[in-house]
Image (spheres, rainbow, N blue to C red):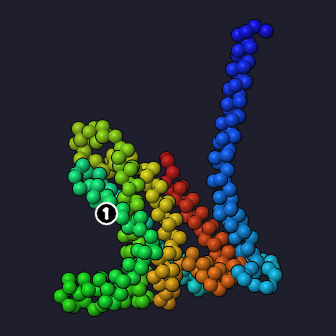
Amino acid sequence: MSSSTTGITKQRGSTSFDGRSQNRVGWAMLTPAVLLLLVFIVIPVVLAFGLAFTDAQLISTKAMSFTGLSNFQRLFSDPTFWRALLNVIVFSLVVVPLQAGLGLFLAILINKKVRSSVFFRTVYFLPVVTSMVVVSLLWMFIYQNNGMLNVLLEKVTFGHWTPVDWLNDSRVALAAIIVMSIWQAVGQHMLIWLSGLQTIPGELYEAAALDGATGWKSFAHVTWPCLRSTRNMILITITIAAMGLFTQISVMTQGGPRDSTTTVVFEAVRSGFQQQEMGYASAITLVFFILILVITGIQRYLTREK
């Protein structure tokens, strides 16, 4: 065997060894994430699906037994569940377009090359980095009878405003939650829109200007089509977040008054951890999972690339 052949063989062996070494390093780095996903996502989801067909309780000396579809029959005949579902649908229908639209509007304003853009970007994003629990507690004070909102409205209307107990009035409680939720999360979507805006090449705007397209025409024919991927991602993320409304309800209203602000996730948590009916709570989460899956699938179909 010649020396050149021996060198090539050694080189191939070294390359193969490096490849195996890289694979081992890759698997070693991947393992912690996979284990965390298995422990905190996959196993709980599988358990929830199984528990939905049982009468499992959180703390009980009674052995768990298979109950078939009884949890689902009880769920679909429960008026509280339908009220929770209606609240979630109303919340999503209002929050998704308003939050996305307001976020885009702010992103366009901040995308201008002005000196104060960094300041406003920070101000708008500040609520996002604040805990939702803290935000909810602050807005509870704002919404009180003698809170800042009622005082402000009284000043603006020169004393003609009658104070409203926003969170204890079933007519306006959900609307109050909606306003607070939009305010809290709009900064996050503003940043996502902004990142999308900054990926649009300036040459497209120059070409559009040469064709006489400025202002609204430039937005409609250049900006909006180029934001397609960003738009789809924001639509899906806001929808999922809106459907999973929980923290604000848990802190501010506990689903009241008279179930006017209860949600599906809140009902699942209340059934599982307060009433200790894990089987029924799992049935709620299973139905909710299927609902989210269907809505996301419809959104993906409607926003697919044609």
Q: Vertically, is 231 above or below 278? A: above
Image position, residue 13 (x, y; %):
73, 24
Is residue 108 in view? yes
Residue sitting nearer the eye, 1 or 37: 1
Does residue 186 appear to the left or right of 2 in the view shown?
left
Residue type pointed to by label 1: Val
Residue at 26% over, 39% down: 206
How many marks are shown on the rendered structure? 1
> Can you say which quadrant of the picture contains the N terminus?
top right
Is residue 94 in view? no
Q: Quadrant of residue 17?
A: top right
Image position, residue 28 (x, y; %):
67, 46
Residue sitting nearer the eye, 164 or 235: 164
Residue furthest left in the image = 158
Residue carrying label 1: 123
* Badge 1 element: helix
Image position, residue 109 (x, y; %):
27, 56
Residue at 66% over, 71% down: 286
Badge 1 density bin: few <14, some 14–19, many ≥20, Cα 10 Å: few
Image position, residue 290 (x, y; %):
63, 67
Q: Vertically, is 5 above or below 65? A: above
Q: Quadrant of residue 98?
A: bottom left
Residue at 68% over, 38% down: 23
Q: Vertically, is 202 above or below 52? A: above
Does residue 243 appear to the left or right of 144 in the view shown?
right
Residue sitting nearer the eye, 58 or 194: 58
Residue at 60% over, 82% down: 270
Residue sitting nearer the eye, 246 or 306: 246
